[in-house]
């Protein structure tokens, strides 16, 4: 998926919000979402679940140029935001989140009825 920029509002001083790139992995009992959030740590990350909407918000502290005034800057600092609509196959209990080196890992357990299972076939 492509990382795209979104506006966070129309007021002065608003910073851009970027849509982080994600990988979604499927396993028999859970799904895993990996999201790229460079510059975000656990203290600047908010993950909420409201009904079926999972929202990831990460803020990045802008760099400090103590004693200097930027003459030219090419890297635009912004925050991150991404939302997902969860199906009923994802259990709302037991969702786990961890972040390391700017990569968020969300583990979304599947409900018992949606977990993949093998059906044994017998001869008649």
Image (tube, rainbow, N blue to C red):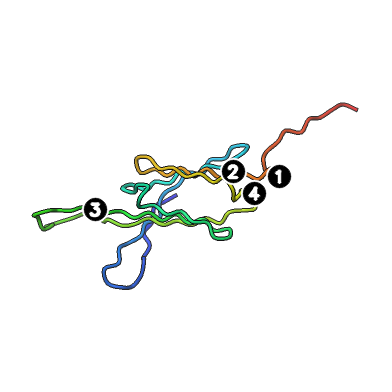
* Tag 3 and tag 2, C-beta contact below 8 Å: no
Q: Nearer the viewer, residue 75 or 8?
A: 8
Residue at 24 percent of width and 53 percent of height: 75
Residue at 61 percent of width and 48 percent of height: 90
Residue 12's spot in the image, x, y percent? 27, 72
Residue occupied by mark 4: 89
Residue occupied by mark 1: 113
Farthest residue to the bottom: give it.
11
Residue 118's spot in the image, x, y percent? 72, 33
Above or below, comparing residue 10 to residue 37 in the picture: below
Real-space Cα distance between discs 1 and 3? 46 Å
Question: Mark 1, mark 3: which one is toward the viewer?
Answer: 1
Real-space Cα distance between discs 3 and 2? 37 Å
Real-space Cα distance between discs 3 and 4? 40 Å
- Dot 4, how many residues are within 10 Å of its Cα: few (below 14), some (14-19), or many (20+)? some
Residue 62 horizontal side relative to residue 33, left or right: left
Q: Secondary structure at mark 1?
A: loop
Q: Secondary structure at mark 4?
A: loop
């Amino acid at each position: 998926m492509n990382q795209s920029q979104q506006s966070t509002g129309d007021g002065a001083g608003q910073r851009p919000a970027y849509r982080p790139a994600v990988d979604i992995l499927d396993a028999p009992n859970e799904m895993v979402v990996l999201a790229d959030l460079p510059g975000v740590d656990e203290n600047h990350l908010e993950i909420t679940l409201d009904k079926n909407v999972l929202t990831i918000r990460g803020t990045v502290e802008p760099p400090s140029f103590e004693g200097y005034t930027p003459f030219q800057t090419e890297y635009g600092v912004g925050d991150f935001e991404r939302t997902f609509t969860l199906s009923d196959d994802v259990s709302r209990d037991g969702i786990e989140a961890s972040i390391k080196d700017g990569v968020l890992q969300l583990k979304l357990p599947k409900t018992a009825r949606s977990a993949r299972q093998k059906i044994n076939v017998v001869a008649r």
